[in-house]
Amino acid sequence: MEATEGGPVQLSRRAETFTESVIRDMTRLALQYGAVNLSQGFPDFAAPDLIKEAAIAAIRKDINQYAITWGNKSLREVLAAKFKSYNGVAIDPETDITVCCGATEAMIAALLAVTNPGDEIIVFEPFYENYGPDGILCDASVRYVTLHPPDWSFDSDELKSAFSSKTKAIIVNTPHNPAGKVFSEKELKLIAELCQKYDSLAITDEIYEHILYDGAKHMSMASLPGMRDRTITISGISKTYALTGWRVGWCIAEKKITNSIRKVHDFLTVGAPAPLQEGAVAGLKLGNEYYQQLAQDYLERRDFLWNALEKAGFGLYEKPQGAYYIIADISQFGYSNDVEFAKYLVKDVGIAVVPGSSFYSRPELGSQQVRFAFCKKMATLEAAAQKLKALC
Ligand code: GLN
């Protein structure tokens, strides 16, 4: 439509192609119907006091102005120490880190910093819903490679054929939202080999790096031979410390890439909240005991919800090895698709979930799946289990 005086102005074609976030929409429906919200992946329990106190102290000390655009020095220093001890990679806190407003900003800043219009990026599906719109924001085309249930493995030939000279980057999310897959060393090595063959980057979303079950080990792509300088590692405090609303995340990459990310980040947001970065420092100093307890608590939640879903008649794939979601198969309930089932579940049963199709480029792949988030208090999960009995 042409813009006329007083008439409608043509708005961004980019924004027009975005659909509303299905995940956040389900949270709204949960509130509307007073349902137990197992849709959006945010914890409904408290963050550690020590972290909150550190942020409060920082505010009182008047750390209230812009942070250094790429992050408070104190945070970059603990991050570098932790990246060495946990992820196995030595980095320079002065040149290799950009602190961003959550892993979400980190991902788009990274993509904008490395892609040119027309480049291709590879994304495994099911995927976390932001990656598609991120591709649109940077005018890159997205090639999807399917993760197949029950174990969410991919076909190595399909992956190989997705790579080409146009591939700028592959996004690897491990542990994986929504599938709970933890990529194995063998899988990561194949991806690494292809990145090197096609001179592509790996952009890894490792936000669930501490939420692991049944002995699963987190491996960072950057720690593999030849990958340190072609990997952008993204993580943040949201999931590890139950602080999704603070919006503190980061990108770790070699100096030249970081330089480009820092410029994009600076113009996008200037910086992440300065006092909250000081809170994050306290979190990152907590150490192994905290991470072990975190994983233990999540294991209990996973097993509780798993059993409740099994009893209610959902089809289940392999148990998640990491992250805090379960994808369940709904074919037993006889609904034509996942959206219809999710509506029924939120209105009539009183549980909000995310329809599976929102995690796929081809919605039909998720049309008999829904995602449950179990980053919730046991009391919340117990309330959900009670409601699930209506399905039995
Ligand atoms: N990562 C969380 C999820 O997958 C929150 C995402 C969001 O709000 N879009 O549910």
Image (cartoon, rainbow, N blue to C red):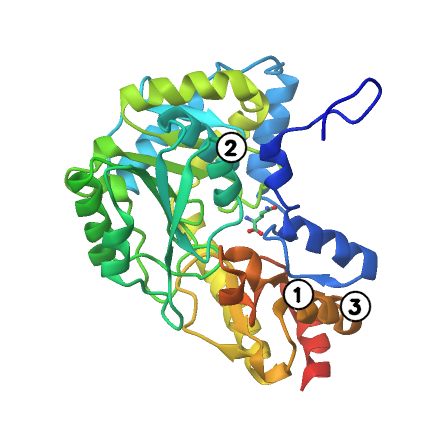
In the foreground, 363 or 379: 363
In this rendering, is residue 164 above or below 22? above
The x and y percentages for residue 112 are: 43, 27
Mark 3 neighbour density, 10 Å: few (under 14) some (14–19) many (20 or more): some
Distance in Å between CA atoms under marks 3 and 2: 34 Å
Question: Outermost residue, right direction?
Answer: 6
Query: What label does residue 137 carry, if any?
Result: 2
Indicate the secondary structure of the residue bearing disc 3: helix
- Mark 1 or mark 2, which is nearer the start of the sequence? 2
Question: Is label 3 or label 2 in front?
Answer: 2
Q: Residue at x 25, y 53 (%)?
A: 161
In the foreground, 279 or 36: 36
Distance in Å between CA atoms under marks 3 and 1: 12 Å
Q: Residue at x 51, y 32 (%)?
A: 137
Three-letter amino acid code at the position of disc 3? Lys
**Residue 204: quadrant of the picture:** top left
Which residue is identified by label 3? 347
